[in-house]
Image: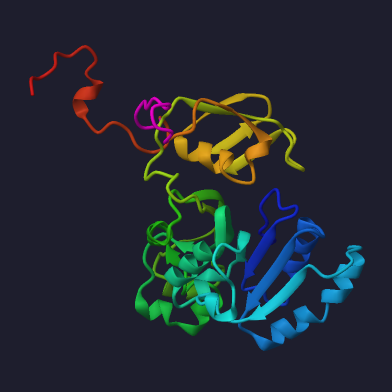
Amino acid sequence: GLCVPEALSGLSVLDLGCGSGRDCYVLAQLVGESGSVVGVDMTDEQLSTARQHVAWHADAFGYARPNTDFKQGYIEDLKGIGLGDETFDVVVSNCVVNLSPDKAAVLREAFRVLKAGGEMYFSDVYADRRVPPHLRDDPLLYGECLGGALYWNDFLALAKAAGFADPRLVEDAPITVANPALEEKLCGIRFYSATYRLFKLPGRLEADCEDYGQAVVYKGTLPGRAAAFDLDSHHHIEAGKVFPVCGNTYHMLASTRFRQHFEYVGAHPHEAGKSAHFGIFDGCGKSLPFASASAAGAGGQCC
């Protein structure tokens, strides 16, 4: 299926592993005539097909000139095909990163070409454990996008190392392996299709979700999202309702293309002297580690 985030009008978008350009042309209509789309693929035949339809789509969309371009190259080395630093607002990819032999390089390059406040929004295949080498090298499993699947926790570590603090899971679904012989070969490894959004917000996102007493109110103004906006699988934000957020979520909204669609309560995190800190944000998967904290009213120990 199509992997496309919200609010793309007027933006510059990069599609990693664009193939024959199908998704690029959908994106070309969504970004509008003032936006632009660049597709990157390493396959001559696929790009030849994609380029045949550039003028046709521009004419069909009523554009004075095409807003789509295709480049041949490797998604691990975008600099090698002339894509500069902080060039794009959004990077997308649809089940391609798992095929790369150097996934860390793909994430580093995506971070490099994104503008501050931009995001990488992509779907891919993940495993519930590390896929052993003999399965990673299996041609059949590789072709099925299973052999190259990252262990989900290794992916999170790679994303953070590339600069994408606090990766957010948007949606996921289990992948069913219907072939009994293939299932036996996998020895119980489970696979999932998942969509993540990774924001480039240098110096703004923290390692954990911290509570600064902030909240947002969604205006209901995103196209097709009048009733509610799902930032990720844990943030279903209804229009008109005060929604408490951690400092990271605050910045994912206030410091990105989503800023105009929300009202904000409380000071920006990290504004010296303006933001009171109330500890870890409740419900984000981490809590106070001290067992004595649950003993309400218990006498304190001296230091």
- Up/down of 22 relative to 217, above or below: below
User: Magenta segment range?
Assistant: 270-281
Q: Tell me what residue is drawn at x 37 percent, y 27 percent.
A: 277
Is residue 299 shown left or right of residue 22? left
- Up/down of 259 relative to 109, above or below: above
Give the main secondary structure of the magenta stretch: loop
Visible residue check, residue 209: yes
User: The C terminus appears in which quarter of the rendering?
Assistant: top left
Residue 250 x, y percent position in the rendering: 52, 36
Q: Tell me what residue is drawn at x 70 percent, y 77 percent.
A: 70
Q: Is residue 279 magenta?
A: yes
Residue sitting at the far front: 272
- Nearer to us in this view, 204 or 70: 204
Q: Tell me what residue is drawn at x 43 percent, y 33 percent.
A: 271
Q: Tell me what residue is drawn at x 39 percent, y 38 percent.
A: 285
- Nearer to us in this view, 278 or 204: 204
Is residue 258 shown left or right of residue 185? right
